[in-house]
Amino acid sequence: MLVGDTADVYLQRTLTILRNESINPVVAMEFSPQNAGVFCGITEARVLLARILPETGSEVWALEEGEAVGAKEVALRVKAPYGSLGLYETAIGGILSSNTGWATAARECVDAAGDIPVVALGARHMHPDVAATLDYASIIGGCVSCSTIQGARLAGVTPSGNMPHSLPLLMADTVKAVQAFDRHMPQEVPRVALVDTFKDEAEEALNVARALRDRLRGIRLDTPPERGGVTTDLVKEVRARLDLSGFRHVEIMVSGGFNPERIREFVASGAPVNTFGVGTYLACASPNPYTFDIHEIDGRPVAKRGRTPGITPNPRLGRVM
Amino acid sequence: MLVGDTADVYLQRTLTILRNESINPVVAMEFSPQNAGVFCGITEARVLLARILPETGSEVWALEEGEAVGAKEVALRVKAPYGSLGLYETAIGGILSSNTGWATAARECVDAAGDIPVVALGARHMHPDVAATLDYASIIGGCVSCSTIQGARLAGVTPSGNMPHSLPLLMADTVKAVQAFDRHMPQEVPRVALVDTFKDEAEEALNVARALRDRLRGIRLDTPPERGGVTTDLVKEVRARLDLSGFRHVEIMVSGGFNPERIREFVASGAPVNTFGVGTYLACASPNPYTFDIHEIDGRPVAKRGRTPGITPNPRLGRVM
Amino acid sequence: MLVGDTADVYLQRTLTILRNESINPVVAMEFSPQNAGVFCGITEARVLLARILPETGSEVWALEEGEAVGAKEVALRVKAPYGSLGLYETAIGGILSSNTGWATAARECVDAAGDIPVVALGARHMHPDVAATLDYASIIGGCVSCSTIQGARLAGVTPSGNMPHSLPLLMADTVKAVQAFDRHMPQEVPRVALVDTFKDEAEEALNVARALRDRLRGIRLDTPPERGGVTTDLVKEVRARLDLSGFRHVEIMVSGGFNPERIREFVASGAPVNTFGVGTYLACASPNPYTFDIHEIDGRPVAKRGRTPGITPNPRLGRVM
Amino acid sequence: MLVGDTADVYLQRTLTILRNESINPVVAMEFSPQNAGVFCGITEARVLLARILPETGSEVWALEEGEAVGAKEVALRVKAPYGSLGLYETAIGGILSSNTGWATAARECVDAAGDIPVVALGARHMHPDVAATLDYASIIGGCVSCSTIQGARLAGVTPSGNMPHSLPLLMADTVKAVQAFDRHMPQEVPRVALVDTFKDEAEEALNVARALRDRLRGIRLDTPPERGGVTTDLVKEVRARLDLSGFRHVEIMVSGGFNPERIREFVASGAPVNTFGVGTYLACASPNPYTFDIHEIDGRPVAKRGRTPGITPNPRLGRVM
Amino acid sequence: MLVGDTADVYLQRTLTILRNESINPVVAMEFSPQNAGVFCGITEARVLLARILPETGSEVWALEEGEAVGAKEVALRVKAPYGSLGLYETAIGGILSSNTGWATAARECVDAAGDIPVVALGARHMHPDVAATLDYASIIGGCVSCSTIQGARLAGVTPSGNMPHSLPLLMADTVKAVQAFDRHMPQEVPRVALVDTFKDEAEEALNVARALRDRLRGIRLDTPPERGGVTTDLVKEVRARLDLSGFRHVEIMVSGGFNPERIREFVASGAPVNTFGVGTYLACASPNPYTFDIHEIDGRPVAKRGRTPGITPNPRLGRVM
Amino acid sequence: MLVGDTADVYLQRTLTILRNESINPVVAMEFSPQNAGVFCGITEARVLLARILPETGSEVWALEEGEAVGAKEVALRVKAPYGSLGLYETAIGGILSSNTGWATAARECVDAAGDIPVVALGARHMHPDVAATLDYASIIGGCVSCSTIQGARLAGVTPSGNMPHSLPLLMADTVKAVQAFDRHMPQEVPRVALVDTFKDEAEEALNVARALRDRLRGIRLDTPPERGGVTTDLVKEVRARLDLSGFRHVEIMVSGGFNPERIREFVASGAPVNTFGVGTYLACASPNPYTFDIHEIDGRPVAKRGRTPGITPNPRLGRVM
């Protein structure tokens, strides 16, 4: 990224022109998201800024990672010689746009779920070059864990995940798959069984509970949409059948097409969910586009048409560099 | 990516278990998008598959890059030992999901624009790690050019871009900025002037036309939403005023919040646009989530509940590896 | 019904008054439905009229059972001395209103299903005093069979029905229930198995097919709404799994909340349904209210305010008595 | 009904099989309506149960006739040997479905009318075999009277009704018809005159009031839809014209297409209505479909897939047999 | 109007300034309506222009009175010294705006009515200073007659009108009122009777037909909204009852709340209307606001921002002065 | 107006008949608007009544000019010999309908604007014969000033208006136009400059402020819709740029397509508007149609069908003549 190849070509051209014209004033550039949301990406942006800004004479002011940000509120202000900053303004804008969009979507799910934890499963529908960043932003937004190892490392949490449908399919039997999992995984990995691969979920939940008994931490319901998806009644019925058979300790995780609206319906219905897994909603969250504009040149207030000249006051900003 | 850190943790665990159980059959895994769209990402996926699949005994079948794909149509089928493939299924799914989402959004704009070319300007709102990929997919979807140098290189086109608002701001005058641009840029870079930084667009368009005359290729209208955005009437009026003053050769490029619906309105109104620039719509396009499922194990038809066992026939697939 | 107790009390009073005043002209009374639909109930109405009208001097004109009738079209005209008819006008109106409402609902389902037969299962949600009449009207509307014995007898068809969920529940196993059914039922009763009582439908369908082999006529999918109901994908998957195992002769009947809209969706999706079972939609069909008015008294055209005096011409009516 | 002919044929077949297999456990069957409403039909269902259940060893628990019932709430639970109950489960379900649907519709009208009484006139659009039951259920729902003699007898009220339009038509004059009514009806029958048969309602109301003076109890406005139906302004005007002429004692009853929404409009407008007559809305009310499921077999909790095994606790149920 | 008191004060001030500055070029001013419609008002505008424009050196180009005009199409162009025209631009704009709005509304009614004539009755809800102009514009829009004497005179037609409800009220009887009308009106005034003042419309229609027989030209149905308004069924019934009594020659005029939508419903229903009377819809029609802008000054193309400089070509314009 | 030519022809005919029949009772005629609103027009109606009513024996009761009036509330009652009043009932109704419609529209704008004054600019889209009346009614509705000289005189206020776009166009420069305005206008006329004729509004606002400095009262933003219209952000930006340059005393007036909804949006956004100018919304306001009916004849309560006989009590009416 530092060689500027991912920069917009016009930025490169502009720097050439300014260099030729010997123009390199200190500018104040402000970054503001188009919509309200959860501010995210400043950690990553600071790493970039630390490498490009000159050692002295620059200032960076920003909101804190994970704070609420209003529509059009200034979330980041960089004062620096334009020559050091110009080539990277799209990169910084892109970092903030994507991260803020993802963290905001995660926050919506987390708010909808109330006290019930939410796990981020979005990586599978996102380009691998940013899948870990998506997971990081999801945790900033409030998710308790995520599915990728690298994303969890970035955010400082333990990754979460039990088994894909491939495992029971390859072992041709859910109970055998669960037993193999139990045999080969370290103790600290919780035993959570997928139960919708071959059989009725309620039936299979009892099967795996009978096989692992106290070592079974939970089951995951991931009924495909072709079969009507997970319903609140299914969760209640599986809970009741587990309880009737004495497996009150077995937790129920649900996944498959959950979004804030559907999470709210599940919470409102009283369905006894222990964990929500959210994937598509996070992966499909749009970036929250940031605008970035010069508001000061060598201390003079300026602005292009449509913007107000001069630094936009925002007492919530703290100096971070 | 090859070390698997961005993979979902459960895939890593699954591979450990299967290795311990000495299970490694040849599986047929099928990838299908949730929604109809423009298939994209196979070029990138093939690079990955070439490095992970064993030299013999594997098959890869796929649609061609840029082809239309139906909802739930199988777009990619990989037959390979599960041990070589399993860790990378989320990476492949993610590559296809993101690329297909972006290419589809680009195609919608291109279709709406009819004969008028569309340039991709989405990079500024997208994480820099995938901004070039977004540009690549936009060009697969039909855009004629894009803003990032690396994206243009991937897609084999010339990048496009004239100047940011920063340039006239830093030079304190649009005409001076355009003259500097003309002075320092190689001949092959088209002179296209931003005209909404300081003054009324129609007035400034005439100013820059008078300054560069025949060397001016075009002007770009990018009126901010705070000022009502670009309107069809503005384009018509600027065209008429340019023509009245003898600048019929000056082209008009528009940008700022364009999407298929708004492009269609402009085309239907007969506004004399020469190029549409589209940014936010591309950057905000959701991935088109792919499902990926095992349909065959060592030649036997299988499928998890909700799917049909056996390979899904699709005569449109061609063998690519 | 003949003693008039179910008549509106004001009709009884009116007859007392007219008798005391020695008024008993021949009237022409016309019955018209409020909405367009399938005319039904004339068979039953004729039985009643045959018992109440005098042997001579009356005329009854009507559409044929099962014919289309327009909104406000005259469907039945009775010319008779008012003294013989008056007490029964609400009974006749009620017979036509209920029957027409039911037959129309059945026709909507049948039209939606195209070539696929529809079976009427509405009795369970309808008062038993008219459940058989509902079944009769459903068959007039185009259903091929119905669930009640008496309804089938009225309509001259063979009743249809395999087993309730009670049977497998009481025998604690679906395969055992199907085998008992096979053991004790006469040959002419088709063997159709419910497969959603205990296990996954696809799994259980294969179980019963393996148990009865060629003697199994079909399976019935009746997945409860708590489990997402029957979906088009479920039908396709069960069909595919049956075919893969060589049970191409086993038919698939679906039931549970079907109505014309949902039937159309299933037909449009190409789901390989062999029979639709419709219950709630038929039972919940509203009567099509008939208005009935005197239009002639002793040959003179009359009408109350809001109606046109004199007999309403309708060449589609035929004399039936 | 007792011979089971109106039963679904599969129940008859099931009983044959169970008898042959010597299976006859005590089951707990629970009946629950699909939607919230006014529970109705238990009086009739108890008559049936009294004839079919064995003298000892059975229990029947239910809500009270006319109580509110929630969606999916258990409203009736029967514990009995399956052999005695099985054939009649659709009959019981049908009784409850139809009665509950009708009583609920009546309650909606009664609630809308506030302090103004509502009379049930639905029989004329309902099959005569259940017209009296419809009237009974309407009164359970809160109507003060009904039009059929038998319905009133079932519910223990006096039937209500004045005259059909036929009477003035046959006597060729509204005033003469009212005078004949007055001459021949017992004193306890209230004199209520239809006034829209031939003339303007306000004019005719004054005519009949002048003819019967203090003996006139009220007039009924039943303006046909072809003439715009009854409007709030018509009621107010007729009231004003009656009052101006000194007939303050004459009540105004309205009928013709009233439903809860229209009743609410009339009440809100302050139109001085003394009685609402409701017909079509009651007759066209859909049944509220009941589901009925076995939840216990010989004391063991069971349930088909989608339901929770074991008796559903409901402290609102009382033992009725 | 000529003294300019109704002009906007800023026009007066502008003329003062220009006179002091000795500026008085020939300008081309163009008038265009905001919405498509029926162009109207040019006749009146020409009278004004004839009095204010200098004898030579001016040109007036316009569409013809009653022609269709498109949205934003130039409908009038005046070339004249600004000093002669400036004070009157709002007056001309107002004349065109009001007239065009009214004529367009009339055309909508006339188009909806097809072959059935429409009479303009809007004056009663419009300020008397422009009531006649409203009637004039209604006739330009296609109405066959209007209610005011002066409006009819302007448009060169015979005014239309029979009697207000006041006449029967003052004579206390509709038949007497009609007979007095017949006694005192010249032969050429058609006898058309209002029939909804006291009695049922059908009854009163027969009464007046029996009283005037062949001298009765028609009856007018104007049932007030409090009584449900005029309905298609009422027209059909009155027609049928008139015909049954031999009064086929009596025409039916309807009025009261008619607008294009309701006229279309009446036409589509086949109700045998002979004339529609339209009042409120015409009176409540909004002006179609005209914009008026200078496009040329002493032959040079000019325009304010947002407009295109120079005369807007429109081959449909003809020179009218 | 007094010669009755603008009266409906049937009123003239009615008076002829009544004169021939020597019928001329004292009637009470009541005028009521169809919709709730701001009562207006009584001042003008009283002038008319003073000229037509006999010197004694008449009474006029009315609400006060500018008071709220309810739907169908009696707002004016005239008791007078029918012969003196009949010919003018449409004129009085028209005066009230038009004035009430306009005043109500003005009140909606004024209420939306809260503390910010509103100026009426509707004349330019209204027929000049009533343009001043529209302005008068707008001021009764709460506007602080209006654009026509005569309207302002009627309402007793000072007219308001600065310059049309014609002035800068004719002087070819906004600053020159403003300077000429300043040179030639009396001191008491506030200097308010149009700033959107040639250049960017913010740029031109600074230009005119620098030219007139303290003598500039305000600027008017009237951006055409072709350029996106006036936006809240434009107002904020112009305010900020004026303030940054030390022109805090310069007020901002906005106009161009304002209506209550858009005014509310501006107020809610906190855009620092000093005056709203409203034109089209006022000019396009529909009349509020009045019904007028005789309710008493020589002291006897009467009414046509659909109305209640006798005077409608309304304690809010005061005797005005």
Image (spheres, coloured by chain):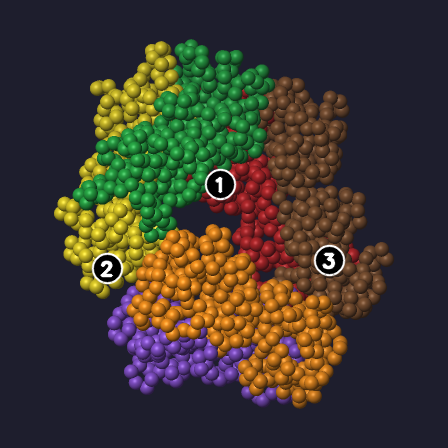
Chain colours: A brown, B red, C purple, D orange, E yellow, F green
Question: C158 and F94: which one is in front?
Answer: F94
Residue at 81% across, 57% down: A190
Residue at 33% across, 84% down: C54
Label 1's element?
helix
Check the residue under mark 2 and report the chain it is in. E
Residue at 30% across, 44% down: F298
Q: Label 2 amino acid?
A: Leu
Residue C130 at what x, y percent from top left? 50, 77
Say if A46 sits above or below E16 in the image: below
Instruction: Residue under label 1, please give it.
Output: B262
Residue D156 at what x, y percent from top left? 55, 73
Instruction: Residue under label 2, please give it.
Output: E206
Question: E258 and B87: which one is in front?
Answer: E258
Q: Nearer the viewer, mark 1 or mark 3?
A: 3
Give the quadrant of the C terminus of chain F: top left
Instruction: Residue under label 3, please give it.
Output: A273
Say if E6 sits above or below F182 in the image: below
CA–CA distance in space, label 2 to label 1:
62 Å
Q: Nearer the viewer, mark 2 or mark 3?
A: 2
Question: A138 and C106: which one is in front?
Answer: C106
Q: Residues within 10 Å of mark 3 (few under 14, many from 20)?
A: many
Check the residue under mark 1 and report the chain it is in. B
Q: Quadrant of residue A271?
A: bottom right
